[in-house]
Image: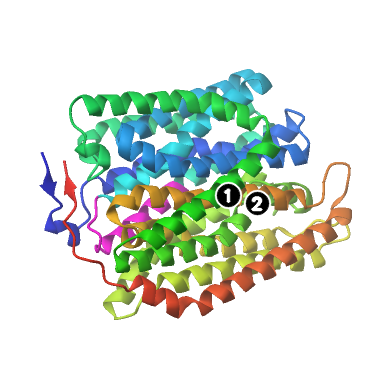
Amino acid sequence: MSASIPASHHASVPPGSGALFFIQTFATLGFAVLYSTLVLYATKRLGFSESQANAMMGIFGAFNYGLHLFGGYLGGRYLSNRNLFVMGMVLQVIGCYLIAEMGVDGLYWGLAMFLTGSGLNVTCLNMMLTQRFAPDDHHRESAFLWNYAGMNLGFFIGFSVAGYFQLTEDYRTLFLFATLGNVLAIIATLCFWPILADINTPLRHIKGRGFYLRMLGGLAILALLVPALRLLLTHASFSGSFVLLLGALVLVLLCVMTARHRDPAERSRMVAYLILALGSLIFWSLYQLAPMGLMLFSEHNINLNVFGWQVAPQWIQNINTLVIVIGGPLMALLFKRLREQGWRIDIPSQFAASLFCMGLGMLVLPVGIHLAGADGLVAFKWIAISYVLQSLGELLISPIGYAMIGKLAPARLQGLMMGCWMMVTGVASVLAGYVSAAMPQNSGSTPVATNPGYGAVFNMLGWGSLAGGLVLLLLVPRLRLLIAARLTPSAVPVAA
């Protein structure tokens, strides 16, 4: 049975949004642990070189974010977003257990299972949230900002615990802890199961035998993904090239779909989506340096003794989470008040501003390197300032990017375009791995010797990001026209 989205969607936050905030927080814990610890674990405990660890982390990020593209399709058409999310959480629990208990032998199988889960279920969460709002409901943006704050609260807890165990290198206990958040996310989802039902997805229109065949097909795909990822993880060079090629093919496919789209207004908005996606690729390629090159730079070239306290490298990333957790809700309130006062909150200008923030975040690091002491160690404040600037850029681009899918994407393409948007981060992760490989190798060297190389790379990245922001700023008037195109009236979405 179907029911129209109620008019209350325009006046209040719909049921399920609050539950998804807590589910998002719990679901992020395990990913936060692996995201912040994998490179250090591989180099300090498993004997990987820095280049090998960076390559593995690049592929880890690429498949995690790249599978978001597939998650929207698999959840919407085969398994339902609710079912796929829970299955993904179960796979993450098993994956973390294998990494914790089996060392090198369990690493690749554990990562394959973890990535299958984390890569597919993030899109499910975003689709469950965005479907609860009508296309023109401004509450969607606030809900995504709150949800993004919940995700970063999960990151804060995960990074904090990871740093604590990093100081003693107790990786087994750390990876077992990572399973806790996933288990809590499963329990919370089951508790709120009825109100998290999918709304107007293709699977909702399949009845009878076809529905069960779709479900079996989805389960078969899950079973095949794990060994496929296990194989790809052991061939990082090939996998990196594969992800870049896949990203290029997806871009071409979206361009063709956009050119052939019949509705002129929807086509205009799809063009804006493509331009903004290319701009975001610059941002995420630099942002994804955090668990790779920036992590190793912090470990070896930053003075981590702050006021007599030894700071774990993972804790530095909590600067990011604090800015997001505090700034996300504040930005939602700020946008609400500015709109009430007649201000125009503009997506393209926010994207341009995010690139300027990222560029400045990179450029402060060469300043810190220039002012480093005789031992070459850079004062902690410079990496802190860099992370604050990067985090402000993230607030401007990431939750807004998720929220805009409901505005720019045609209803029947929302799952695909949400996945494509998140796949940009996967491609960026591979590019970040290449950038990290261009940074100096710290093994057997000193901060004095590696600082010049780091400074040159950070300068190049910073000025490149500022240039990208300037180009996007010049395109703002055109993007405004494309986004402002009026959609052809269509049927109101329905919910089961």
Residue placed at 71% from the left, 53% from the top?
435
The type of residue carrying mark 2 is Leu
The type of residue carrying mark 1 is Val
Quarter-of-image position of residue 470 = bottom right
Region of the chain picked out in magenta, as a range = 132-152
Taking depth in this image into account, of 286 and 103 the one nearest to the observer is 286
User: What crowding class fits label 1: few (fewer than 14 Cα within 10 Å), some (14-19), or many (20 or more)?
Assistant: many
Say which element carries label 2.
helix
**Where does residue 478 sit, x and y in percent of width and height?**
44, 77
Taking depth in this image into account, of 235 and 445 the one nearest to the observer is 235
222 part of magenta stretch: no
Residue 291 makes an appearance in the image: yes
Residue 15, compared with residue 174, is above or below; it is: below
User: What crowding class fits label 2: few (fewer than 14 Cα within 10 Å), some (14-19), or many (20 or more)?
Assistant: many
Left or right of 446, for residue 391: left
Taking depth in this image into account, of 178 and 470 the one nearest to the observer is 470
Image quadrant containing the C terminus: top left
- Label 1 vs label 2: CA separation? 6 Å
Image quadrant containing the N terminus: top left
Say which element carries label 1.
helix
Residue placed at 27% from the left, 76% from the top?
340
Marking on residue 86: none
Residue placed at 67% from the left, 59% from the top?
383
Residue 25, compared with residue 456, is above or below; it is: above
Marking on residue 431: 2
Residue 305 makes an appearance in the image: no
134 part of magenta stretch: yes
**Where does residue 274 sit, x and y in percent of width and height?**
46, 62
Left or right of 263, for residue 116: right
Q: Look at the numbered discs 1 and 2 and tell me whether their residues touch, using CB distance below 8 Å.
A: yes
Residue behind mark 1: 427
Taking depth in this image into account, of 464 and 212 the one nearest to the observer is 212
